[in-house]
Structure formats: C-alpha cells, structure tokens
Amino acid sequence: MAGLEIVTFGCRLNAFESEVMRGHAQAAGLGDAVIVNTCAVTAEAERQARQAIRRVRRDRPGALIVVTGCAAQIDPGRYAAMEEVDRVLGNAEKLEAESWTSSGTRVAVGDIMRVRETSSHLIDGFNSRARAFLEVQQGCDHRCTFCVIPFGRGPSRSVPAGDVVSSARALVDRGFRELVLTGVDLTSYGAGLPGKPSLGGLARRLLALVPGLERLRLSSLDPDAIDAELWRLIAEEPRLMPHLHLSIQAGDDLVLKRMKRRHSRGLALAACERARDLRPGVALGADFIAGFPTESEDMFRNTLDFIGESGLDYLHVFPFSARDRTPASRMPQLPRLLVKERAAILRAAGSRALARSLASRVGETAQVLVEQPGFGRCEHYAPVAFTGEALPGEIQRVRLTGSEHNRLFGQAA
C-alpha cells in the first residue's frame, strides 16, 4: 500500500487541520488513503482541488479518497457527485476522531452555522516543519461581500486560553521553537469567551507561561481590530516576531465600503505607520483583491498607490473571484481580462516592494529558523539560503550577504 497522503489547499489553518486529520487517520489505521483538504476562497482554488482529486484517482486507483475542507463544506453535493470520491466530510466532522474510526456515511457534513465551540487539538508533528501552527480561533461573524468562508467555517469561536497554553507547552516540549497562532478571523479571538480576553492578552499570557517558547508569530490580522495589548507586545516583546500580515484587500475607500470592510484607507495606513514606529524594521505584508466589481481605474490607482505609501514589504494578490451566495457576485463585474491585468500589475508592484525590502536587510545578521539544510526563514519571515552547517529546527545566526530571486543569501555566523 502507498500509505496515507494529505493534499492541502489554502490557509495555515488548513495546514494545521491537515495534521490533526493525519493523527486521527493514522490512529484509525487508515493505510492506502488520500485526504484532500479543500479551499473555497477562489474558484481557482476549487478547480485545483478537483484536478488534484482526479489526478490522485489516476495515480492511486485503489486508494480511499476523502474530501473535506471549506469547498466540501459549502457544496458537499458537488464533491459527492465526483466518481473519484469515496467520502466527503465537513469542517467540523473532519476534526472528530470518530469520523475516521468507522466508514460511516459517504457524506457527513453538518450545519456549520450551528457550531458554537472549538477545541484545542494536540498533534504529534507537522510533517517535518520547523515551526508549528496552533489554532486558537475558528469561524467569522463578519460578512465581507466577497467572502464565502463564513459558510464554510461557521460563526466565530475561540479556544480557551488555558487550552492554548497547554498545547503550546506540549509543542515546545516536543522541540518546536516557533509557534504560529492561526484563525479564520484571528483578531476576533476571545469575543465569545468569559471575560472576553483579547488576542494581545492571549499572546502575553502564552509568552509568560511558556518561557521555553522562543518565537511567536501571528497569522493574518484585521488592521481595524488590533487591540491595545497586542500593540504593546509589538513594541515591547522580542519573542513576538517583527512580522505582521494585514488583511487590507483594497486601498480605496469606496471599494472598501462596497467590500463591507471595517477599516478605511486612512486607518490601514495608520496601522502600518504605527507598527513601524513601535517596531522599527518590522516586515509588513498584506492581502489585496484585484478587480473587485465596480472598481474604476482611479480606484485601482488608489490601491496601487497605497502599496508605496504604506511601505509594504510583500503582497498576497488575489484576482477577484465571484463566489455563489455572496453580495459581490451580484454586483456589476469587470471583464476577466481586466481583472487579470490588474492582478498582474499589483503582483509586479509586490515583487518590487519585496526586492527593495530584501535588499535593505543585506549586511544585517539574522536569526534563521532552519527548515532544511541550508535554508530557513529569519525573524521577518524572509526566506534565507545560507552556507554552513545547521540542522532543521535549529536557530542559526546568519550574516546576510545578498538578495536575489525573492530570497536572501548569507553565511552562518
């Protein structure tokens, strides 16, 4: 038998959940099986997942194929109708051990909107990753007009801080030196818990109670919802990595309003400026959607100008993709060619910003978390190729000597 394989699409939260499923599937004795953990952010992500399912069946004709994730949660019938698929599991069901211990029904997808709690999941490893992801929040109560993810993840819910600390302590005891806190809407952490603790409060408690944790990193943050305690940590706590990724999406106020985002252009610029003032040298990244419905040339120009004004170090750019059940899918759409052109322009701007950012770090000494021999990521999450002996999982001092091809180069110091 070829063994258990997991094909993961999408976000860091999906990567974490894939490892939870790996543990459940191995404990259940699944051998010749492939789990496809789908994403529904864009139509392209779904197309790639379906393509992967067909490829898996072609390459492994006897394997059990289980499809799960956001796309499967939102439209289970579509995946159940694929002749290559043996089982379909919802986003809640995939994290339950009992879903893997028996064959069960072919389609097990519950009403995700009724889920009100989430639990900490302790896993044995991360498929040789040097860092570990730690899920602290699930779901989203906001309704951005372009986003279908609330239908795949359900309402916002948070893992109690004590459970987060226990999981973090166990991961550190197993040798992980860097943890990444993840969630669907991470800055909403704690809203449904007693006392309504904030994300910043959770991070401070985690760092205080797990002194062996050397590096803490955060996944995507809403610039409108960064709490006061988190701002203080950004300024004061060296173990919180100088790397923030912001969910900005656009740099034009009218587009942001039509997206139903909670921040304005000015607020997003102010968040970037505040981060740089509090933590000089911080790396700032952001998500952007190109070609949102009704976006004029001037609106697009405002987004393009935002990149330079904010001093962003890198971008994640998504061409707008109309998703069923979302208000944006019913707005006047731009021609697909124009959407692709604008995405290409934003990506080019992002490439230039990244090149400038990497070049500015040449001559510094970085602390690189080694992911594989001769390669890792520094405090700012920039990829670093280096010469010198260091094992995966070690933190290696590296003198940065150059930059090229979207990465830094250096010599172990």
Image (tube, rainbow, N blue to C red):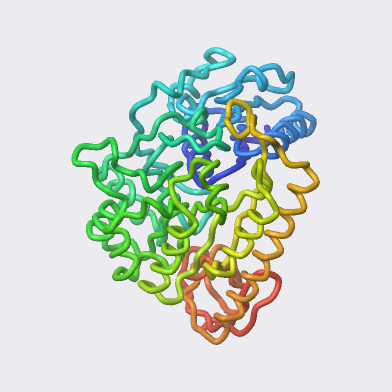
Q: Using the rendered image of the protein, determine whether residue 315 is visible from the camera's viewpoint.
A: yes
Q: Using the rendered image of the protein, determine whether residue 391 is visible from the camera's viewpoint.
A: no
When asked about the image quadrant of residue 305, the answer is bottom right
Q: Relative to the observer, which residue lies in front, 253 or 230?
A: 253
Q: Quadrant of the N terminus?
A: top right
Q: Relative to the observer, which residue lies in front, 76 or 332?
A: 332
Up-down relation of residue 377 to residue 32 (above or below): below
| Residue drawn at x 59%, y 14% as measured from the top left | 106
| Residue drawn at x 53%, y 61% as measured from the top left | 285
In the image, residue 216 lies at what x, y percent? 38, 60
| Residue drawn at x 57%, y 31% as measured from the top left | 327
In the image, residue 271 lies at what x, y percent? 42, 62
In the image, residue 8 lies at what x, y percent? 60, 41
Q: Relative to the observer, which residue lies in front, 85 or 394?
A: 85
In the image, residue 146 lies at what x, y percent? 58, 37
Total marks shown come to 0
The residue furthest top is: 105
